[in-house]
Image (cartoon, helix red, strand yellow):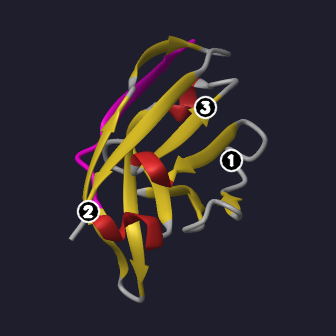
Amino acid sequence: QVQLAESGGGLVQAGGSLRLSCAASGRTFIWNTVAWFRQTPGKEREFVGRISPDGSGTFYTDAVKGRFTISRDNAKNAAYLQMNSLKPEDTAVYYCAAQATINGYAYWGQGTQVTVSS
């Protein structure tokens, strides 16, 4: 069992940066792929990117490639989403998720709001 909790969201001006954290509980975290998603009202949840269990591999959706970076510190049971050059269209609730399965990710955090003003 893994429990996830995001933090670090807030209000930032366009062009600014934010770093989101995903704190995990549970010993199996280090074995899990971790992903970040985002969702705006009335839209489906959108995949942002993911990181492999050992942190050696990352993958990003085109919309954030070159601006966002996912990292993790397994010793701290944590993952991070560094967001640079933020745009108003990045405004969303951001979620971290862990343990990819054929039916999607098994564990989800509660989300943290990111608002980018123009």
- Residue at figure coordinates x 42%, y 45% from the top left: 76
**Res 63 visible:** yes
Q: Which residue is mark 2?
A: 26
Give the Cα separation between the discs numbered 1 and 3.
12 Å
Q: Quadrant of the N terminus?
A: bottom left
- Residue at figure coordinates x 48%, y 54% from the top left: 74
Judging from the image, what secondary structure is the residue with disc 1 in? loop
Mark 2 or 1, closer to the camera: 2
- Residue at figure coordinates x 23%, y 46% from the top left: 110
- Residue 19 part of the magenta segment: no
Counting from the top left corner in percent of width and height, residue 45 is at 40, 57
Cβ atoms at labels 3 and 2 below 8 Å apart:
no
Q: Earlier in the sequence, mark 3 or mark 2?
A: 2
Q: Tell me where the magenta segment starts and ends, as one range.
A: 108-118
Q: Dot 1, how many residues are within 10 Å of its Cα: few (below 14), some (14-19), or many (20+)?
A: few
- Vertical arrangement, residue 86 with respect to residue 26, above or below: above
- Residue 109 part of the magenta segment: yes
Q: Nearer the viewer, residue 76 or 10?
A: 76
Amino acid type for the residue under numbered disc 1:
Ala
Judging from the image, what secondary structure is the residue with disc 2 in? loop
Q: Which residue is mark 1?
A: 63
Give the Cα separation between the discs numbered 2 and 1.
32 Å
- Vertical arrangement, residue 10 with respect to residue 27, above or below: above
Q: Earlier in the sequence, mark 2 or mark 1?
A: 2
Counting from the top left corner in percent of width and height, residue 19 is at 52, 28
Give the Cα separation between the discs numbered 3 and 2.
26 Å
Judging from the image, what secondary structure is the residue with disc 3 in? strand
- Residue at figure coordinates x 66%, y 56% from the top left: 61
Counting from the top left corner in percent of width and height, residue 72 is at 54, 49
Would residue 89 appear left or right of 95 to someone viewing this image?
right
Amino acid type for the residue under numbered disc 3:
Met
Q: Which residue is mark 3?
A: 83
